[in-house]
Image: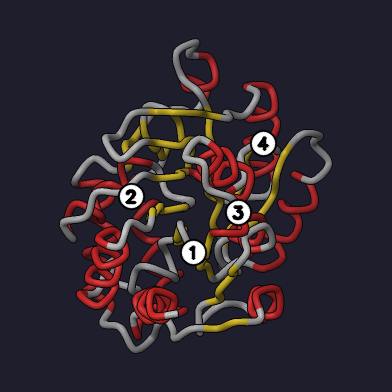
Amino acid sequence: MIKCIATDMDGTLLTVTQQITPENREAILKAKEKGVEVVVATGRSYQEAKFVLEEAGLKLPMICVNGAEARSEEGEIVSSSPLNKDQARQAALRLVENGVYFEVYTNKGTFTEDEDKAISIIVDIFSTANPEVPIEKIAQAAEERLHKGLVRTIEHYDKLFEDGQSEIYKLLAFSLDDEKLAAANAALREINGLAISSSGSENIEVTSLDAQKGIALEKFLSSRGISMEETMALGDNFNDASMLERVGKPVAMGNAVDQIKELCGEVTLTNEESGVGVAIMKVLED
């Protein structure tokens, strides 16, 4: 019997315009009514994830920043696994050397050194991957990240690395240049103690080895007396692999990369077709 459902957000629970469909929302509420724990496991910061959930009228516990932080339903931090500051500096240097734009996720929020780049690169990536979606909608979603304070501008990332009160959770790098991204990926892998993954072909996510969705989910479930075998997880990309390979019922999205589909075996509909809601209703009926 499934006692917990863990879902990724981007490419999974959310549409390309960053919305939770009514079908997904109703399925989550139905699962909660039946006593099933529902948790979000995302690469997003708490602030970005909370914003989207609140818009849909949902309140859920969250595993954020690929597992670097876990929050209760009330938003209380229950665990964190930050990067070592020296590791973060080294990783940042590798990205700069390879000409790859990146943002820094911390316990104080998400930061960018270049506001214009923060908007333009997201628009370029999402519009390239989803040509059927009006670019105005994509641009609006990208601009919201900054205008609503979900991503803040800082003069230089060194201020974060030198701040004793800041915990560095993740470096998220973006590029549409495959060669630059591959070179940066190779350079990052020379640094010991890092977990290197991605949530899309155009990005690299850098976290601590302990900051992985599967590890964080297992800790979260243990505190609630639920086993991984009693859990269903849904995802679409490589940063979901650590939880999908650990749970009793892994489910890939219809839009997932082929390796994730192979890992899971079971595939639901795409994120644009409310695949999460479909999978939840199916498991509730079993």
Would you place residue 230 above or below residue 87 in this image?
below
Label 2 vs label 3: CA separation?
23 Å
User: What residue is shown with label 4?
Assistant: 210
Q: Residues within 10 Å of mark 2 (few under 14, many from 20)?
A: many
User: What residue is shown with label 1?
Assistant: 2
Question: Mark 3 or mark 1, which has the lower sequence index?
Answer: 1
Q: Residue at x 58, y 30 (%)?
A: 81
Report whether residue 209 is seen: yes
**Front-most of residues 231 and 178:** 231
**x and y, in percent, of residue 160 in the image:** 48, 22
Labels 2 & 4 near each other (Cβ < 8 A): no
**x and y, in percent, of residue 144 in the image:** 22, 54
Q: Nearer the viewer, mark 2 or mark 3?
A: 3
Quadrant containing the C terminus in the rendered view: bottom left
What element does badge 4 sit on? loop
Labels 4 & 3 near each other (Cβ < 8 A): no
Amino acid on which disc 2 is placed: Ala
* Horizontal relation, residue 177 to residue 132: left or right: right
Report whether residue 180 is seen: no
Q: Residues within 10 Å of mark 4 (few under 14, many from 20)?
A: some
Q: Residue at x 59, y 69 (%)?
A: 250
Q: Residue at x 44, y 70 (%)?
A: 11
* Disc marking residue 49: 2
* Disc marking residue 228: 3
Question: Mark 4 or mark 1, which has the lower sequence index?
Answer: 1
Amino acid on which disc 3 is placed: Met
Q: Nearer the viewer, mark 4 or mark 1?
A: 1
Residue 106, by quadrant, is top left
Labels 3 & 1 near each other (Cβ < 8 A): no
Label 2 vs label 4: CA separation?
21 Å
Q: Residue at x 19, y 45 (%)?
A: 148
